[in-house]
Image (spheres, helix red, strand yellow):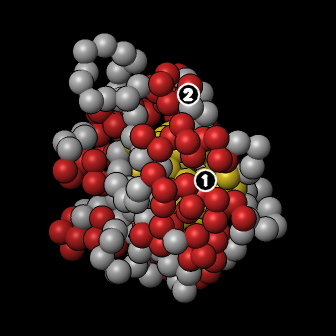
Amino acid sequence: MRRSLVLGNWKMNGTRASAETLAKGIIAGLGDDVAEIGICVPYVYLPEIGQIVKNTRLALGAQNVADKPSGAYTGEISAGMLKEFACHYALVGHSERRTYYGDTDQSVAARFCQAQEQGITPVLCIGETLEQRQQEQTFDVITAQLDAVVELAGIAAFSKSVIAYEPVWAIGTGLTATDEQAQEAHQFIRNYLAAKDQAVAEKIQILYGGSAKPDNAKGLFAMPDIDGGLIGGASLDAESFLKIYHSV
Ligand code: 13P
């Protein structure tokens, strides 16, 4: 049986002080161990938040990782560096990275591999834009995004990863995929994996991301192929993040 996972993605928000308050607030309200939980924080806050989450069950994650192990890549942060700060997760291929910073299916696959080489769990973010959905290309887009990682990393690598389905049209817009729309995409992803390796497909956690909030989380998480959420805006408030966590 898969355990659920709720991950916060703080994106480029907060200050050093507010980050510390937020992390402490989440820890204070963790309560029953209903699922796995983590926060993906801005790089510069990793050392400090790492100390705060130490010996708690709130896991630490980064929002990206370099596609190379080291070298002359100004501005990049390697998986080895993240490992030094007890990073458990690294997002790869978030749509904001793909849209604004030119991350491609191939570079995302390389980032996925870099994370795994250091024992960091990559959270592979995939999903279609509104235009792609309207043109009924959703499954083609998801397939291409998954294919690139399977080609480079191999299907077995997915047993040590997480997938986040994030329809781009639902990110930060207040629009949420209906429970059924989300389930349809999650089932497609799981079937894609199952066709290559049944055990991997059954084990992997597939999270939903895209305007998940305290009032819609329960319905989404009740779907059979939705194993939790990757939460943006609502993860910036300890109370609403914890409400989502306690909806699993
Ligand atoms: P929102 O929850 O703000 O829509 O963001 C979703 C997301 O991009 C999480 O990675």
Drawn side of residue 78 relative to residue 204, left or right: left
User: Disc 2, ligand 1: is the CB inside 8 Å?
Assistant: no
Calculate the distance from the C-alpha at mark 2 to the C-alpha at mark 1: 16 Å
Q: For numbered disc 2, what is the local secondary structure?
A: helix
Q: How many marks?
A: 2
Question: Residue at position x 41%, y 51% from top?
Answer: 125
Q: Residue beneath label 2, please? A: 83
Residue at position x 29%, y 33% in the image: 106
Q: Quadrant of the C terminus?
A: bottom right
- Front residue (pair 12, 4): 12
Task: Give percent across and percent down for residue 234.
Answer: 48, 72
Q: Which residue is mark 1?
A: 38
Residues under numbered marks 2 and 1 in contact, where contact means CB atoms less than 8 Å apart? no
Quadrant for residue 1, please give it.
Answer: bottom right
Rendering coords of residue 209 (x, y %): 45, 65
Amino acid type at image mark 2:
Lys
